[in-house]
Amino acid sequence: MGIEIREVDTDIGILSCPVFICDQCQQVITDGDWALYQWKTLDGHIIDGSLAFLHKGDCNDAWDDAHNDMGSWSTMELSYFPIYLGNNIGVDWNDNAKGAANMAAL
Ligand SMILES: [Zn+2]
């Protein structure tokens, strides 16, 4: 699951927007500071590259307990995910912020 397109009620109306879905409770994550993404590592190396997106607290605790078969979980704040991803595809943050705002207004 992880990322889906959903119709989101925004300040300018209902828009089709990508959202993060918690892999544990299946609810939309609306606060990146209270969520994380994580991946499995073994001996300091990524095992398979799959990601889990989770609310912090009960959801990530339950997820970790249910998926503790091999390696350990590495985690990062979900708020950082779009920044790292955007940097990896060469996003020009100033120009693209204007472009996204213009597309949302259509
Ligand atoms: Zn959750």
Image (cartoon, grey):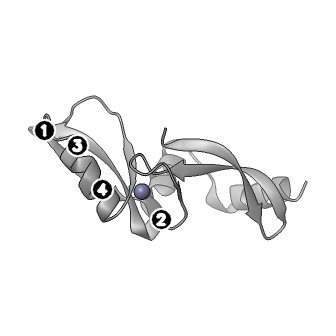
Under mark 3, the amino acid is: Ala
Residue ID for mark 3: 66
Q: Do residues under tags 1 and 2 come within 8 Å of each other at their CB atoms? A: no
Under mark 1, the amino acid is: Gly
Q: Which of the numbered marks, if any, corresponds to residue 71?
A: 1
Residue in the foreground of this view, choosing between 44 and 20: 20
Residue ID for mark 2: 32
Spatial CA distance of label 3 from label 2 is: 23 Å
Spatial CA distance of label 1 from label 2 is: 25 Å
Could you tell me which residue is drawn at 76 percent across and 62 percent down? 9
Residue ID for mark 4: 60
The residue mark sitting in front, 1 or 4, is 4
Under mark 2, the amino acid is: Gly
Give the mark nearest the N terminus, 3 or 2: 2
Spatial CA distance of label 3 from label 4 is: 10 Å
Taking the image as shown, residue 71 lies to the left or right of residue 30, namely left
Could you tell me which residue is drawn at 60 percent across and 42 percent down? 4
The residue mark sitting in front, 3 or 4, is 3
- Tell me if the residue at label 2 has its CB under 8 Å from ligand 1: no
- Tag 4 secondary structure: helix
Taking the image as shown, residue 12 lies to the left or right of residue 70, namely right
Badge 2 density bin: few <14, some 14–19, many ≥20, Cα 10 Å: some
The residue mark sitting in front, 3 or 2, is 3
- Tell me if the residue at label 4 has its CB under 8 Å from ligand 1: no
- Tell me if the residue at label 3 has its CB under 8 Å from ligand 1: no
Give the mark nearest the N terminus, 4 or 2: 2
Give the mark nearest the N terminus, 1 or 4: 4
